[in-house]
Amino acid sequence: MQPTSAATPAQNHLIELLPARERGRLLALCEPVHLVLSEALQEAGAAAQHVYFPTEGFISLVSRVDEHPGLEVGMVGREGMVGTPLVLGVARVPARALVQGAGASWRIEAAAFTEELQASAALRQQLARYVYVLMAQAVSSAGCLRFHHVGQRLARWLLMSQDRAHRTQFHVTHEFLAYMLGVRRVGVTVAAGELQRRGLIQYQRGELTVTDRPGLEAAACSCYAADRAVYADQLGGAAGPAAPRAASSVRAGT
C-alpha cells in the first residue's frame, strides 16, 4: 500500500451521499492511499484491519472453496466500499479482497470506522443499504454462474469493470478472466472470440478494448441490468460509465 494525495472527497459515491457534517467527520478519519494491482486488501477469515472507499481503483471479492481456484462473487469501485462485515458488527471477512484495477482510495482503520459508525445514524443507514446491494450482487452472481452461459457472463464482467474503471481499454489475460468467471480458459477464449467477431470488443495480446458498449450490454445476461437497478433503487445512482477515455487503460490479472 502506497500513500497518495490523488483521492478527493467527491469521488466515492457512498461518501458523497452523506450529509455534509457526517461526510466531513468521516473524511477526517481517512487517509488517501493507492491501491496496487493484484494486492490483497483482506483475506477470507481474517479480521478486517481497514475499510476502503475506492475513488479510482476497483476490487474483486473472491471466494475460494477447498483447493479450487477463486471465483469472483462481487466487485467494488467508487460506488461502494470494502469492509462491509464491520457494518454488521462482525470483524472477520468472508471473501478475499483483491485489487483488480489500480487507483486511489480512502482508507480508515477498522476501530475508528466502528466508532464513527456508532456515532452516526446517517452513516449506518447509508451503509446498511449498501450491504443489501452487495448481498443482492452475490445472489445474482450465484444464479448467473448456474444458468447463464460464459459469453453472457463475460459481457457482464467487462461492463462491470468498465463501469468502475471508467475506461474503454483493459489489459487482461484469458487466464485471469477464467479465474474470475470460474470457467476453463478455453471457454473464455471461445466467448471472447465471439464477442470480437460481432464487433463488440477488440482483443490482441492481452489488450482488450470495448468498441460497442450498447452491443455489449445487449450481449450481457439480465444480471447486469438487475444489479444496476438494485443500486439505483437503494442508493440513487449506479456505477455507470462516465465518458470513457479511450487513450487510458486499466490493468487486471497481470
Image (tube, rainbow, N blue to C red):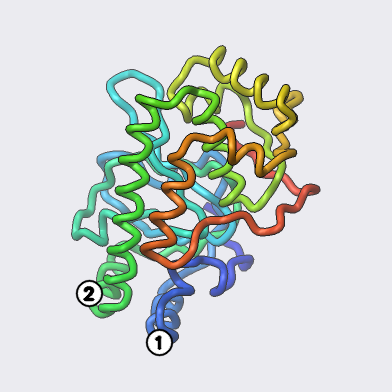
x and y, in percent, of residue 38 in the image = 53, 38
Place of residue 202 in the rendered image (x, y in percent of width and height, measured from the top left): 75, 30
Label 2 residue SS = helix
Q: Position of residue 5 (x, y in %)?
A: 62, 68
Q: Compute the Cα span from label 1 to label 2.
A: 15 Å
The answer to whether 159 is drawn above or below residue 146 in the figure is below
Circle 1: residue type? Arg
Regarding mark 1 in the picture, which secondary structure is present there?
Answer: helix
Residue 102 in the figure: left or right of residue 66: right
The residue labelled by disc 1 is 21
In the image, 88 versus 128, the foreground residue is 128
Quadrant in the picture for residue 130 = bottom left
Tell which circle, 1 or 2, labels the residue nearer the N-terminal end: 1
Which residue is rendered at x = 52% and y = 56% of the image?
239
Q: Is residue 159 left or right of residue 46?
A: right
Q: Residue furthest top?
A: 186
Q: Which residue is mark 2?
A: 118
Q: Amino acid at mark 2?
A: Gln
Residue 140 in the image: above or below residue 108? above
